[in-house]
Amino acid sequence: MTNNKYTNRPIHQLQELLRLNGVDEEWEPILLPALMTLEDSYLEWMAAGEGYIPPRDRLLAAFSTLRPNEVRYILFGQDPYPRPESAIGYAFIDGRVREIFSPRGLSREVNRATSLRNFIKMALVARGSLDPRDTSQEAIAALDKTLLVSQMRELRENFERSGVLLLNMALLFTSKEESRRHIRAWRAFIEKLLEGFEAYGPTLILFGAHAREVQKLKSARGLPQVALEHPYNHTFIVNEKAWELFGPMDLLLKR
């Protein structure tokens, strides 16, 4: 008996979603089978384009600025930021933040975003700019930032130059109470997506407990993995595994 919860949606409607997000046809062999794992009722709800963030034309934004053969890492966060201005379709990239630094150290917007603040501090330590024993605003303010990126857009572009695909375990957000439901809804998508990447062999970067669920997926077992605490935790700043992984990328260097 056919399970009609899945894949009844015409393929052209899924292709339309890719085009709406500016995703190249090169992604279709990977993304279309993955999208087909979503329940039809869930896809219909998504197609309505209401009640979730990011908007429908940003759901797959992370796939619009990298080609499949450029992906060397897949970074998994939990779910999108809970603010419309922040959720722009990339894990960890906050659309509300423009400037990274200010004369006082980190900008006010970065300082308010705990995970982003800790990641920037870790990246500064990893590149040798900051002493892990002193990551204060005063220490950051004293740094020569001439050769450092200044905007969030530049940080995202540096992630992509290093081949990092910025994904969440759920690609949309409605409320904190429904986060687990959406993560479950996208689980099969993630598993099928990783099947499509088998030939490329990317390293999986897993931020936090929800992302570590990827380790249970059959399609993830043959891929290299680096599991880290979520950057929301202050210990992330001084995690040597994070330094070893992100240090060579030098994500804060202005290109």
Image (cartoon, helix red, strand yellow):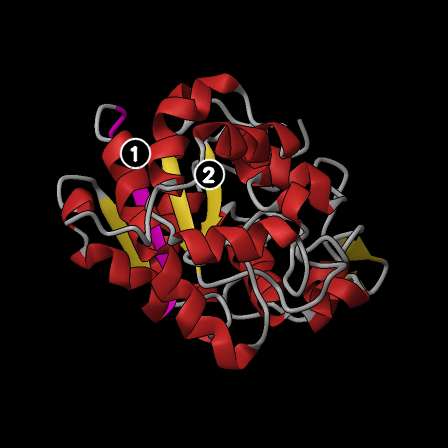
Judge left or right: residue 177 versus residue 140: left
- In magenta stretch: residue 35: no
Residue at point 67% right, 41% down? 57
Q: Are marks 2 and 1 in contact (CB under 8 Å)?
A: yes
The amino acid sitting under disc 1 is: Pro
Residue at point 33% right, 70% down? 209
Residue, disc 1: 202
- In magenta stretch: residue 203: yes
Q: Give the image quarter of residue 208.
A: bottom left
Check residue 165 in the rendering and tell me which mark sits there, or answer none: 2
How far across and how far down the image is residue 224, in percent?
A: 21, 41
- Depth check: give the residue in front, 221 or 20: 20
SS at mark 2 in the image = strand
Residue at point 46% right, 37% down? 164
How far across and how far down the image is residue 112, in percent?
A: 71, 72
The amino acid sitting under disc 2 is: Leu
